Amino acid sequence: MDLGLTDKVALVAASSRGLGRAVAEELAREGARLVLCARGDAALMETASALRAAGATVEAIAADVSRPADVARVVSAGMAAYGRIDILVTNSGGPPAGPFESHDAEAWHEAVRQNLDSVVELTRAVLPGMKARRWGRIINVTSIAVKQPVDNLILSNSVRAAVTGFARTLANEVASHGITVNNVMPGYTRTQRVDELAARNASLRGTSPEAETAVWERQIPMGRLGRPDEFAAMVAFLASERASYTTGASIPVDGGWIRSVL
C-alpha cells in the first residue's frame, strides 16, 4: 500500500526513544522528512544519526514541549528547514504513577503542562499552515487509559482524557480544511515507560517487575505486550493519504485489552 507520505514533513515530539522513535522510523521508511524533538539531547542526536544513516532527512532540536517557547523554537526550526509541516504527532512522557493522595498541586500542574498544554501549543503553531495548504494530519499519542482507566495512573487517566476532548472538538472545526485529527491509544507496549511502571507497581505490591508484566499479559487477549513498530504502523496509516476520511477517532493499539464495546 502506497501511503503517499513521500516528501511530506512530519514533526514527531518526544521522538528520541520508545513510541516516538518508532513512529519517526516508520514515517521515515514511508519517505517522510522529519522534525524530531526531545528533552534529552544525547539520545535525540543518536536517534537522528541512526535515521540519517538509514537514508532519512532529519532536523533534530532538543526541546521541552511543555514550554511554549520551546514549542515555538521547534516549529520555527522545522519551517526554516522545510518550509512547512504537514503532519504533527504529539507525544510526551507520561506523568508519574501513584494514587491521588501522592500527587500535590504542582504534580497536577506539571502533568497538564506536559500532556495537555504541549498538544494545544504544538497544534496552535502548525494549524495555520495546514489550513492555508488545505491538508494536514494531527495525531495525538494518548493511552488506553482514556477508555479504561489504569490503576495507579490517576494523572495520566485524567489529563489524556482532556486531550481526547480537545481533539474530538478540533476535528470538527478543521475537517472542511482537509485536516484530520485523531488519537492513537497505545496499550501495554515494550518501552522504557512500561518497564518503569512495572517496577513502580512491583515496589508498591512487594512483587517483581516480571510478575507485574505477567499480570498485564494475562489481561491482554493476545497474551503479550505490544511492539513499538506495531503502534507506529497505525500512526503512519493515519498520517497518510489513505486515511483521508478518518477524523475525530481514538484508535486503540492494545492487543484487545480494552473490553468496552465502544
Image (cartoon, helix red, strand yellow):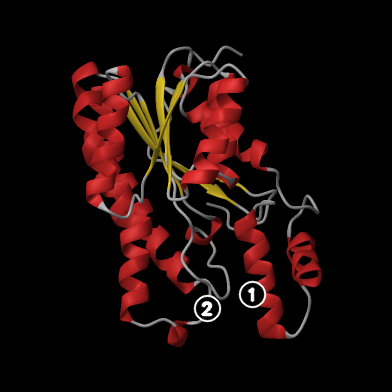
Q: Residue visible at 48% across and 16% down?
A: 5
Residue 131 in percent (x, y) is at 21, 24
Image position of 39 with respect to 212: above or below: above
Left or right of residue 37: residue 165: left
Q: Residue visible at 25% across and 31% down?
A: 76
Tell me where residue 47 sits by quadrant: top right
Q: Secondary structure at mark 1?
A: helix
Image position of 25 with respect to 69: above or below: above
Q: Residue visible at 63% across and 65% down?
A: 196
- Number of labels in the image equals 2
Q: Residue visible at 75% across and 70% down?
A: 209
Question: Circle 2 is placed at which residue position?
Answer: 98
Dots 2, 1 in contact, CB < 8 A: yes
Is residue 251 something that shows in the picture?
Answer: no
Which mark is on residue 200?
1
Badge 2 or badge 1: first in the primary sequence: 2
Q: Amino acid at mark 2?
A: Gly
Residue 138 in percent (x, y) is at 37, 35
Tell me where residue 210 sits by quadrant: bottom right
Dot 2 alpha-carbon crowd within 10 angstroms: few under 14, some 14 to 19, many 20 or more: some
